[in-house]
Amino acid sequence: MSRILVLYGTTDGHTAKVARAFREQLALGGHQVDLVDAASGGPDATGYDAVAVAASVHASGYQREVIQWVSANLGVLNRVPTIFLSVCLGVLQHDPKVDRDLQDLIASFQRATGWLPSQTRLIAGALLYTQYSFVKRLMMRGIARKAGGDTDTSRDYEYTDWDELRQIANTFAGQLNGGRLSQSA
């Protein structure tokens, strides 16, 4: 089986949860999978058969540590199978302008790093109102209201489709070994 790195950047913790679920699904297929927070600096990508990178959209960009790590490991990333998981709330809007903005954000990330992942997938994120500061809670509620989203700040909202994420992991792993992983988590 393959040795796979799942590297992630997170601001409020939800992308870490996405990365853990992705890692767990890959491990079900017998792959050796390392899960690393980019904030720790991340390992050299040399020696991995494949790499998954998950980062979340905040303030019209991705985590600085992810950008730095991808740039530093560009040679390996452009030689092995890779996937970029872009975690964001905008995907829920189904608005052509927002869709274009998200694609532009990904293109900007690719230009900044030079990385052209084998595949890129948009993953719905979460509104973690109970974990936000007062100011951020108000700001996120305003954004959610404008987008037609959930605005009750007394609770959190998780929009990630976990079954879809498992299927994405299965497909990615299938490209590595010609097979499919179990549908269960």
Image (spheres, helix red, strand yellow):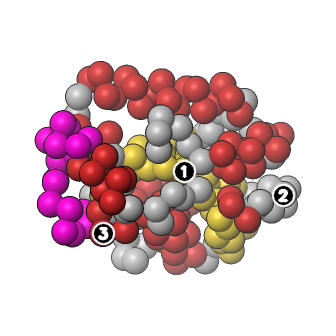
Q: Residues within 10 Å of mark 3 (few under 14, many from 20)?
A: few
Q: Which residue is mark 3?
A: 130
Give the mark nearest the N terminus, 1 or 3: 1
Q: Which residue is mark 1?
A: 55
- Where residue 147 appears, x then y in whole percent? 20, 38
- Where residue 153 appears, x then y in whole percent? 20, 62
The Cα–Cα distance between marks 1 and 3, rounded to whole angstroms, is: 21 Å
Instruction: Tell me the residue at 17%/47% (across/down).
Output: 149
Is residue 23 in the magenta section? no
Task: Report whether residue 59 is seen.
Answer: yes
The residue mark sitting in front, 2 or 1, is 1
Residue interval drawn in magenta: 142-158
The Cα–Cα distance between marks 3 and 2, rounded to whole angstroms, is: 36 Å
Task: Report whether residue 83 is seen.
Answer: no
User: Looking at numbered disc 3 in the image, what kind of residue is underneath it?
Assistant: Thr
The residue mark sitting in front, 1 or 3, is 3
- Where residue 102 appears, x then y in whole percent? 41, 31
Vertical comparison of 96 with 106: above or below: above
Numbered mark located on residue 44 in the image? 2
Numbered mark located on residue 106 in the image? none
Nearer to the camera, 64 or 87: 64
